Image (cartoon, helix red, strand yellow):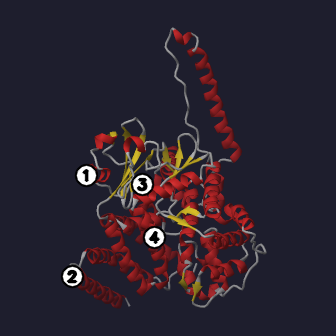
Amino acid sequence: MRARLWQAAKGTSALAALAAVAGYHFYEGTKRLVEFNFLVLPIALHYKVTQIATQQSSERTKREAFARLHSRYAPRSLEIILRQRGFYVKAAQFCSQLHGVLPDEYVEAFSVLRDDAPSLPFYQIQPILERDLGTRISDIFSYVSTKPLAAASIGQVHAATLRNGTEVVVKVQYPLAEEQFYTDMEHFMRLSSIIAPYYVEILRELRNNFLNEFDYRREADLQRQAHVNLRKFPGVVVPLPFDRDHPSCREFGNLCTKNVLVMERLRGQSVDSWATEMLQLRAVQEGTTVDEVMAELRAMSMKDVKKLLPSKLALDTLIAYRGFCDALRNHAAFVYNWTLGWIGSPINYVHGARPVNIYSVVDTIFRVQAYCIFNDGFFNGDPHAGNVMLLDDGRVGLIDWGQVTQFAPKEQALFAKMVVAVADRDEQVVAELAWEMGLETEHHTEWVAAKVGTFYCGSHGDDVTGELGGPILFEENIAKIDRVTRSPDVYITALRNLIMTRCAVSLLGFPFADSAVCMRSAAEACLERFGDSVSTVPCRKVPRPDVEGLLGHMRS
């Protein structure tokens, strides 16, 4: 057996090498794809060999074998992605959000890409800035940081100050980013049509959503619309672009071009950065490392994780107490400054750091995303933790509106029905709505449709994924019961919004959040507005297939 596996491995490697030599010089897109496959094939092959070799082993032996592979290849995979850039970085950024769905080793390795993807030196950025703005940098800006604040898959962001003293950020698109991205997407779609046809529509929908990201003028329009739509939320801010409608346009002209986007600067940190700081702080307090803290958290049950959170009352009390202390001291400083301070040195006012009110932030995030989907039908398809900011003034900042999708009323209503049905855990209605939204499976199994709908619209908790090996093995084991042949492509971006929103709030300490439960009231209001409704029976079940028999290879 081992000899046959080794012969197969050698033969596959030889064919891969031959294909690489033959196709390497066709054109840039083929070159990039072949290069990627050549780098990834040994990794994929090692996983496949391990899968075959452990087929009859216990579940514990399998977990240990694959854990060793994850630890070995997650850093290597990151190196490959950094080398390829473009679409590969974008895909890895999405994967880095899937806590509990993908192996933790990969999630942690790829998380650096959300705020710290590869960047270009400023001497390569400056010509793009000056060409697109049609003038020298010094004619518009009194200061531009040469070190980027952040870098993403298609561009990077620099802090800057306009000549009138206004603080801004400047987003600049990389040369060839658009060309490489679409070439990569076309190749992946062709590959998917051969090995996983049901992913083609998903990739096509994602490609269409990425269109706005390569024209910052369109992104500026979408961001301005988001700013207008969310003005009713006093605790939320979307930065305004310095476009043709901005008051500063009279002084500087339109500062939003195809490759350059200038916008208001928000002061604060992303949810991603905040979560990293909290992990580092906990590691210091426990006298251990961040990796050890992560291992400890992964080993905990959801119930144990909940115990780590401060109660809402305790957190509110602490925030109020610190605010009261600041107010007391500032009142004394005010009295002094307007009396003895006239002849002596004035006392500075203080605004001490206060803990983030995670309960309020999580509530705000879900309310805003639900409002965008069910009220405006205008929502962000990329609300990952790096695009949600905890601002210094206590508000929540929402940035990067390049991947906006707009729902028609009919689509809003159907999605609202699904959210209500998932919140009620009515498997029969969830399955019916999943079919209506476009989900297809080989055998039209009602139970599978209900599971898939609940997984994407609700939660990946134990009640949904436990009997299928957990979130990491969910899709693999669903395929063994009844393979998905078509995804609900029209709703892909909305489902992505829900998944990424759950991932963001999980970093705030709520990995058990259920997006359907949190968005239910907004979904019901949407249906009421349309004069529509959905009839559900809470906790209604559908016939369950012989899961244990179909997944009999799973051994404890």
Q: Earlier in the sequence, mark 4 or mark 3?
A: 4
Picture quadrant of residue 249: top left
Which residue is disc 4 drawn over?
67
3 or 2: tag closer to the N-terminus: 2
Comparing 178 with 157, the one in front is 178
| Pair 4/1: label in front | 1
Q: Spatial distance from mark 2 to mark 4, Cα to Cα?
A: 33 Å
Q: Determine contact: label 3, label 2, CB under 8 Å.
A: no
Q: In the rendered structure, find residue 204 and report the number of the disc placed on it.
A: none
Q: Disc 4 or disc 3, which is closer to the eye?
A: 3
**Residue 21: mark in rendering:** 2
In the image, what residue type sits under mark 1? Pro
For badge 3, the amino acid type reads Asp
Q: Position of residue 174 (x, y in %)?
A: 32, 59
**Label 3 – label 2 distance at C-alpha:** 36 Å
The residue to which callout 1 is attached is 127
Location of mark 3 (residue): 115
Q: CA distance from mark 2 to mark 1?
A: 36 Å
